[in-house]
Image (tube, rainbow, N blue to C red):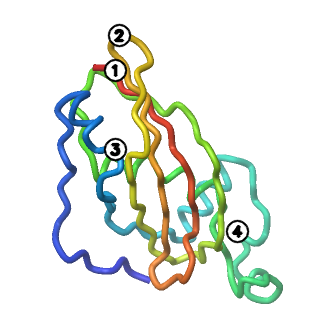
Amino acid sequence: MTAPMASQARSPVPIPDAAALRARVGGPALVSDWIEVDQARVDRFADATGDDQWIHVDPERARRESPFGGPVAHGFLTLSLIPSLLVQVVRIEQRMGVNYGLNRVRFPAPVPVGACLRASFVVAEVADVGDDALQVTWDVTVEANGGGKPVCIAQFVTRHYF
């Protein structure tokens, strides 16, 4: 499957300072471009993590025996795409940013190999965590093209140093 065509080229929303980040709380969702999850990506993730369960890496067996009708991506592969999808939608002008953690992660639907995914991000909360740092909680929904349910719902927590 190829990625659906975007209606327009996306440019990351510039966030020039802490005040601009605070102003995004509860604002409209920022939506990434589509990214394809092909078998090569799934295989590389399996190699990196040691999770080589057949539902991910053996397409023939997965077509025969899996309740999903074919191979599916690891849930944690889907989760690991969130930071790279976030930088597609925002450009925070900061000294440094780090992934701080996750709250409430669920995988409501599988990701068939070959699916195209995109994520939407809403700033749920911004909190001070020092003189020059903010902690941001992002409500993230990852969807597959043509899927009826999200494939991942999570709260992604980042820290930004200005």
Q: Position of residue 93 (x, y in %)?
A: 21, 30
* Residue where numbered disc 4 is placed: 57
Badge number at residue 124: none
User: In front here: 56 or 84?
Assistant: 84
The C terminus - image quarter: top left
* Residue where numbered disc 1 is placed: 161
Mark 2, Cα crowd under 10 Å, few <14 / some 14-19 / many 20+, is few
The amino acid marked with disc number 4 is Val
Mark in the foreground, 3 or 4 = 3
Instruction: Identify the element where label 1 is drawn.
Output: strand
Mark 3, Cα crowd under 10 Å, few <14 / some 14-19 / many 20+, is some
Which residue shows up at 28% across the image and 44% down it? 24
Q: Position of residue 36 (x, y in %)?
A: 44, 70
The amino acid marked with disc number 1 is Tyr
Query: Which mark is first along the chain, 2 or 3?
Result: 3
* Residue where numbered disc 2 is placed: 131
* CB within 8 Å, label 1 to label 4: no
Instruction: Identify the element where label 2 is drawn.
Output: loop
Badge number at residue 25: 3
Residue situated furthest right in the rendering: 65
The amino acid marked with disc number 2 is Asp
Mark in the foreground, 4 or 2 = 2
Q: What is the distance, in whole Å, between disc 3 and disc 1 at their CAs?
A: 18 Å
